[in-house]
Image (cartoon, rainbow, N blue to C red):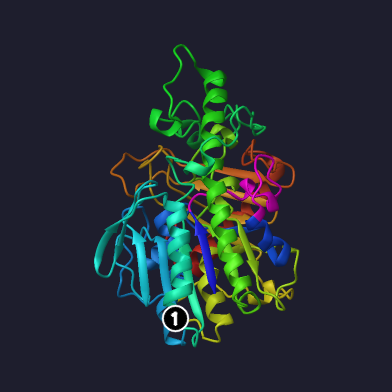
Amino acid sequence: ILFIMSDDHASHAISAYGSRINRTPHIDRLARGGMRLDNCFCTNSICTPSRAAILTGQYSHMNGVYTLNDPLDGSRPHVAHMLRSAGYQTAMIGKWHLHSEPTGFDYWYVLPGQGDYYDPVFLHEGGKTKHTGYCTDLIGDFSLDWLRKKRDPRKPFFLMSHHKAPHREWAPGPKYKNLFDGETIPEPDNLFDDYSNRARGAANARMRVGEDHTEKDLKAPRPAGLSGNALRKWGYQLYIKDYLRCVQSVDDEVGRLLDYLDQEGLANNTIVIYTSDQGFFLGDHGFYDKRFMYEESLRMPFLIRYPGVIRPGSVNRDIVLNVDFAPMFLDFAGAKAPGDMQGRSFRPVLEGRTPKDWRKSMYYRYWMHLAHHHVPAHYGVRTRRYKLIHYYGQPLGKSGALKEPTEPEWELFDLEKDPREMRSVYHDPAYAKVVRELKAELDRLQKYYGDQPV
């Protein structure tokens, strides 16, 4: 099992997902040879909690990782421990970002915290080592080195190859430093969103392109007198080009790993996955970053190839969550998922036989009330057609911030009629029945997962 994960790579910056702004030929190889999931969602759209959910198969309130500052308890069993017990050789290379030393891995070589794009330090069992070069290239090098020299060919392997890119502040590698120079990247249709017809949370968020970007983000000072839509338009081109330049290096490294599997005759017996720890706003709603339950932040790219098992070029729209990844790994490995894992193996989905009782809705919760980018804490439910979000206005539990409560608000989106989520219909009398039904479903899901409503 080769699990490749980047940081903040939105699905709409992958050509296999129909990107209008870039091409990712190597990541696309997985789509052609396997399956593209169109409704894969995270349960808490922020880096550290999502990584913990992927390893443990549990929501934040169960695994204890609510915020960017919460460590994963190294003594807590997670999927790497379980796969190792099942006879797998396990390795973790790249971005760990869980504030604790990796456990459950036969080998690990990880960045401290966010790590650096250039000349990064890596942590390992022997201490730490500084390397010269570009982080994305180095993670590819170290992943290939483990496969070539440290892997035991007598055992199946589970390799987590995790990239820092394209995380903020979007520092491109030397190879792509001038990619897109002289080009104009197409803007999203809601780059100039004015946040009307929705809850105040979006209007108050401080993640607006140009306006809230720093000079370090954009590598350029703000032109004097530039404001409003003109500032957003200017900032978008600088931001998105560096973001996409970082993505291009990740795509190259995916290609190198796929080529190795082909050359060594391992491709037919290896499950290969490409994903990101959450989605990301690429100027959508005028935003960068994530956190909100809006589609661009909620949706994770997920491409998976397993020759002879997963039909090439297939697409699936069933709702799959990041807490499902660990049970799925264990299922394919012939191991049983423990009862405290809240996710469910989606192996049948991948094999083209979705169970009749597969979920029709998903539960989401973001805990960091006003801690970063002034995004309020919220939870919600998403079905195939509707999304109900409750900004509950309280810095409860592991909120990550000592902030004053805010006024509770609700949003409802009809994703069939309004896929870009530009108008909340929560107060529209025509949707009163939908609101009642979704509140009941939200209550059911909170009870099912053992979370406490507000």
Is residue 90 or residue 138 the one in the foreground? Answer: 138
Extreme residue in the left direction: 127
In the rendered image, the quadrant that contains the N terminus is bottom right
Choose top left, top right, bottom left or bottom right for residue 236.
top right
Question: Could you classify mark 1 by the number of other residues whose Cα lies within 10 Å: few (under 14), some (14-19), or many (20 or more)?
Answer: many
* Amino acid beneath label 1: Gln
* Residue occupying image coordinates x 24% and y 69%: 126
Q: Would you say residue 437 sits in the magenta stretch?
A: no
The image shows residue 188, relative to residue 11, as above or below, that is above
The image shows residue 433, relative to residue 322, as above or below, that is above
Residue 425 position, x and y percent, is 65, 40
Q: From where the camera sits, is residue 54 visible?
A: no
Question: Which residue was labeled with disc 1?
Answer: 89
Q: Would you say residue 20 sits in the magenta stretch?
A: yes
Choose top left, top right, bottom left or bottom right for residue 37.
bottom right
Residue 142 position, x and y percent, is 42, 64
Q: Which secondary structure dominates the residues rendered in magenta?
A: loop
Horizontal side, residue 249 vs residue 358: left or right: left
Residue 154 position, x and y percent, is 49, 88
Is residue 142 or residue 103 the one in the foreground? Answer: 142
Extreme residue in the top direction: 225
The image shows residue 242, relative to residue 339, as above or below, that is above
* Residue occupying image coordinates x 62% and y 39%: 424
Range of the magenta residues? Answer: 7-25
The image shows residue 408, relative to residue 72, as above or below, that is above
